[in-house]
Image (spheres, helix red, strand yellow):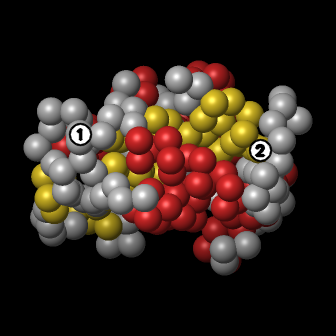
Amino acid sequence: MRDAGEAMTPEALLARLAARIAGQAPGRFLRVGVDGVDGVGKTTFADRLGAAVAGLGRPVARASADGFLNPRAIRHRLGRGSPEGFYRDTYDLAALRRHLLDAFAPDGPGRFRAAVFDPAADAPLPVVEQQAAPGAALLLDGMFLHRPELRVCWDLSIFLDAPFAVTVPRGAARGPAFGSPDPGAPSNRRYMEGQRLHLAECVPAARAHVVIDHCDLAAPRILAWRP
């Protein structure tokens, strides 16, 4: 599967995706999800893609699912080391739908909140609403975006694919707070096994409209390009 697509430059890939997004359903809101395991490069990819789409003249709104975390007590109610808890309880999916995704539905109001929760303070954020420009494309990055509660929302979903042997060290390189670079470290079990639950239950590589091999950031490959 990883050899299915020809390697290209990141710039060429972003240009191809941006053209698809800029030309899809013009005149109405669009919801684009960038999914993948922790450390695969979702946030940087979505930032760059958003800039490319805006460069083609389509308004863009950016957000991360990490702005919709559950409180710590809910995230850890199955135990600090529980993979099941990581998968099931990380995100407040109802708030994500209500305050963001539903706002960008085809008949949505376009009035949205980009984040509702501050994980550092373990407290809700003050209410700050924004009004999306007509025809804006929302680009949301996050894990678990192909869960049944969310997969119906996407006008276009992108799955960045890479094995844990690549993503765990890549994620750890962001700093000490991001854990051990060793995929076999006990501290990584909760996160890896929780993400495996999503991969097994939701099979995002089979559901996403676009699947990208993101092992080599300098030479990504398109593995699937679906209607």
Horizontal and vertical percent position of residue 14: 60, 55
**In this image, 102 relative to 213: left or right?**
left
Assess disc 1: are there few (<14), some (14-19) or many (≥20) residues with their C-alpha within 10 Å of its C-alpha: some
Image height of 47 relative to 215, above or below: below
Read off the residue under disc 1. Answer: 28
State the CA–CA distance, disc 1 to disc 2: 30 Å
Horizontal and vertical percent position of residue 178: 64, 68
Mark 1 secondary-structure assignment: loop
**In this image, 102 relative to 35: left or right?**
left
Q: Identify which residue, 9 or 185, lies in the foreground.
A: 9
What residue do we see at 16% from left, 62% from top? Answer: 130
Question: How many marks overall?
Answer: 2
Horizontal and vertical percent position of residue 108: 15, 38
Read off the residue under disc 2. Answer: 221
Assess disc 2: are there few (<14), some (14-19) or many (≥20) residues with their C-alpha within 10 Å of its C-alpha: many
Horizontal and vertical percent position of residue 1: 84, 29
Type of amino acid under label 2: Arg
Q: Identify which residue, 81 or 137, lies in the foreground.
A: 137
- Most extreme residue toward the bottom is 175
- Disc sitting over residue 104 in the figure: none
Q: Identify which residue, 212 or 81, lies in the foreground.
A: 212
Can I make out residue 183 in this image?
A: no
Mark 2 secondary-structure assignment: strand
What residue do we see at 11% from left, 43% from top? Answer: 109
Q: Identify which residue, 5 or 75, lies in the foreground.
A: 5
